Image (tube, rainbow, N blue to C red):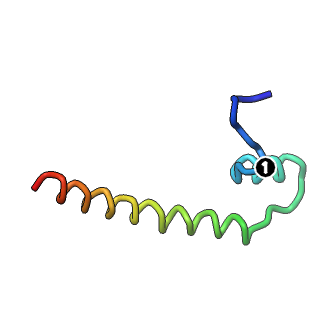
């Protein structure tokens, strides 16, 4: 069954892996969008965290 609250339909890496295991072509546009979201989200989160730290420690 999986962990409580885990929805495989919303887990992109799981869907990508299942597509590869079933010998279907991966949706590379979706994979690119997911990768780009990580590239944008992680630095943005780091920037927000550093601003919050500076403001909090004043």
Residue 25 appears at what percent x and percent y? 85, 62
Residue 28 appears at what percent x and percent y? 74, 68
- Residue appearing at x 22%, y 54% in the figure: 53
Query: Quick one: label 1, few (<14), some, or many (20+) residues within 10 Å?
Result: few
Q: How many marks?
A: 1
Depth order, front residue of 26/48:
48
Residue 11 appears at what percent x and percent y? 70, 49
- Residue appearing at x 89%, y 53% in the figure: 23
Residue that sits furthest to the left in the current view:
58
Identify residue for label 1. 9
In the image, taking residue 51 as reference, residue 58 lies left or right, namely: left
> In terms of image quadrants, where is residue 44?
bottom left
> In terms of image quadrants, where is residue 50?
bottom left
Depth order, front residue of 45/25:
45
Callout 1: SS: helix
In the image, taking residue 15 as reference, residue 38 lies left or right, namely: left
The C terminus lies in quadrant: bottom left
Rendered view: 58 above or below 6: below
Rendered view: 35 above or below 56: below
In the image, taking residue 52 as reference, residue 17 lies left or right, namely: right
Rendered view: 36 above or below 7: below
> In terms of image quadrants, where is residue 6?
top right
The N terminus lies in quadrant: top right
- Residue appearing at x 78%, y 49% in the figure: 9
């Amino acid at each position: 069954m999986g962990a409580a609250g885990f929805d495989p339909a919303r887990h992109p890496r799981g869907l990508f892996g299942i597509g590869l295991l079933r010998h279907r072509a991966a949706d590379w546009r979706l994979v690119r969008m997911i990768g780009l979201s990580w590239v944008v989200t992680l630095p943005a989160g780091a920037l927000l965290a550093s601003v919050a730290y500076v403001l909090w420690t004043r």
